[in-house]
Amino acid sequence: MNSISIIIPAYNESKRILPTIEGLVDFFSGFMSKYEIIVVDDGSTDGTSELVKKFASGVSANISVERLDLNCGKGMAVKRGVEKAENDIVFFVDADQSYGPENIAYAVKEFEDPAISMLIGDRNLKNSRIINPPPLLRTISGKIYSLLVQSLVLPGITDSQCGFKAFRHECAVNIFKRVTIFRFGFDVEVLYIAKKLGYKIKKMPITCRNTIESRVRLINDSLRMFSDLFTIRANDKKGLYL
């Protein structure tokens, strides 16, 4: 069975991150022994790092904390995690328990196919389960953004923003050393680079528990995500993804 690295990017997650880590530790205790959890604190000001370190000191699990001095964006946090990851399969998951460990078990089985380089959760697939669906406005804006992503940069990818993705280690390293976008548009860039490099991406059904709190500022962040699509196309023309 493959060894696993779990990367959790975190920004001011002191109220939500421990249940996520506890759930992962409980899951792995009955699933496999060779795993690591890497929490990357993206410049938090609420003591997230200290909280995780204290928890880690009291358990036998392999939990480490990386800290960015400034808030650089989720993409930069994941990139730092990839640089530190040592195991065969690299996952990144959100800090708020949106995607439970049951998704990891499914993904590990999928990676038994050696042709698969990357797995992405897709909330639109038939067997996906959405618990606590998001507000209607978020759903509509997400659908519109998905159509833009498919028409401008990623035809066939219907859920680029799902916060559950997994890579073979070499694939993750090769992708993230080319990443230039570190905030909300970074998921799209990661997928674009993966396709550019010829990696096989497979969609998987996902169980997603939407949290009440969302940090997406609908208008400002949507505009930035839209402009990032053109940045990706411009970067490709410059040869930055080769």
Image (cartoon, grey):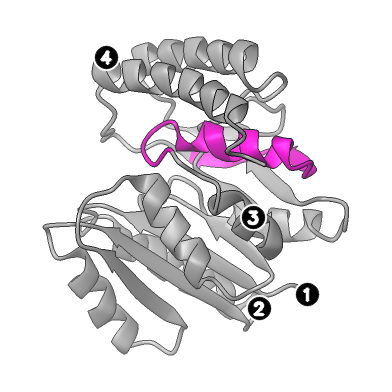
| Mark 3 residue crowding within 10 angstroms, few (<14) / some (14–19) / many (20+) | some
Contact between marks 1 and 3 (CB within 8 A): the answer is no
The amino acid on which the numbered mark 3 sits, given as a three-letter code, is Asn
Q: Earlier in the sequence, mark 3 or mark 4?
A: 3
Q: Which mark is residue 219?
A: 4
Secondary structure found at label 1: loop
Label 1 – label 2 distance at C-alpha: 8 Å
Label 4 – label 1 distance at C-alpha: 44 Å
Contact between marks 3 and 4 (CB within 8 A): the answer is no
Label 4 – label 2 distance at C-alpha: 43 Å
Decide: is 139 above or below 130. Answer: above
The amino acid on which the numbered mark 2 sits, given as a three-letter code, is Met
Determine the residue positioned at 75% across, 41% down.
Answer: 201
Q: Visible in this render: residue 127?
A: yes
Asked whether 236 or 67 is in front, the reply is 236
| Mark 2 residue crowding within 10 angstroms, few (<14) / some (14–19) / many (20+) | few
Q: Which residue is labeled 1 in the image? A: 1
| Location of residue 59 (image quadrant) | bottom left
Decide: is 70 above or below 161. Answer: below
Contact between marks 2 and 3 (CB within 8 A): the answer is no
| Residue 217 horizontal/vertical position (percent) | 24, 24
Secondary structure found at label 4: helix
Secondary structure found at label 2: loop
Q: Which residues are magenta?
A: 181-208
Q: Nearer the viewer, mark 2 or mark 3?
A: 3
Q: Earlier in the sequence, mark 4 or mark 2?
A: 2
The N terminus, quarter of image? bottom right
Determine the residue positioned at 35% across, 12% down.
Answer: 137
Residue at far front of view: 238
Q: Earlier in the sequence, mark 4 or mark 1?
A: 1
Q: Earlier in the sequence, mark 2 or mark 3?
A: 2
